[in-house]
Image (cartoon, rainbow, N blue to C red):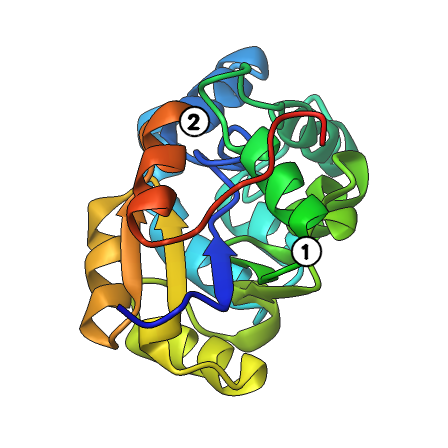
Amino acid sequence: MAKIGAVFFDIGGVLLTNGWDQAERARVLAHFSVDRAEYELRHEAANDAWERGLIPVEEFLDRTIFFEPRSFTAADFLERMKAESKELAPGLGALGVLRRLRASACLKLAALNNEAKELNEYRIERFQLGSGFSAFFSSCYLGLRKPEPEIFLVALDVFQQPPETTVFIDDRQANCDAAECVGMHGICFQNEAQLVAELKRLGVELPPTGA
């Protein structure tokens, strides 16, 4: 087996809660008494453009929320969206694994995620993800989204890593399958212990906790 030289992490569902997935949308829409079914009719097309960096958050919200008068502002809504971002509970998230890998200084580490710019940059700053990653291959910067193979190929090209020397960690099997189709090792994340075991199987040894 080729020696692993780089590990790519998804963020939502692996390190943090999701940024704007179904559960997050449901809570925020309920808070502002916005009809969810009506919202979802507008969500997919607008979200695709937003996550690819093709439109700013103001246009996204105009398309999905503020197509009619509301009793709250776009700033109010965006702040509530941001508040949905939290660290996953110890053992259920991989932040500890990321910190241990960073401490070892033996691997290239990067995020590879689908996220809109405004939420992505909030989450990077709020949870200090820049201290763990040397690059962010985010859909909002590349104009590409998982599971499109091109997003993985760009990350491999930039890092100059053969695919067989890389690992991609995501909580969705379809995204892991897409990474494996370009030759990467995919790990479908379940919890911290499972991730550590899978990395060890691939020859990635982590330093002890607190090292």
Left or right: residue 153 versus residue 132 is left
Q: Residue at x 43, y 26 (%)?
A: 192
**Disc 1, SS:** loop
Say which of 154 and 160 sits in front: 160
Question: Residue 23's image quarter?
Answer: top left
| Residue density around tag 1, few if under 14, some if 14–19, many if 20 or more, within 10 Å | some
Say which of 55 and 196 sits in front: 196
Instruction: State the image coordinates of residue 121 (x, y, percent, origin top left).
Output: 73, 51
Instruction: State the image coordinates of residue 104 (x, y, percent, origin top left).
Output: 66, 49
Q: Find out whether the residues at labels 1 and 2 contact each other: C-beta distance under 8 Å.
A: no
Instruction: State the image coordinates of residue 13 (x, y, percent, origin top left).
Output: 43, 34
Label 1 sits on residue: 133
Quarter of the image containing the C terminus?
top right
Regarding residue 191, the answer to whether it shows in the image is: no
Residue type beneath disc 2: Glu
Residue type beneath disc 1: Phe
Taking 188 as reference, is 133 above or below it? below
Label 2 sits on residue: 192
Taking 62 as reference, is 35 above or below it? above
Say which of 167 and 128 sits in front: 167
Say which of 25 and 203 sits in front: 203
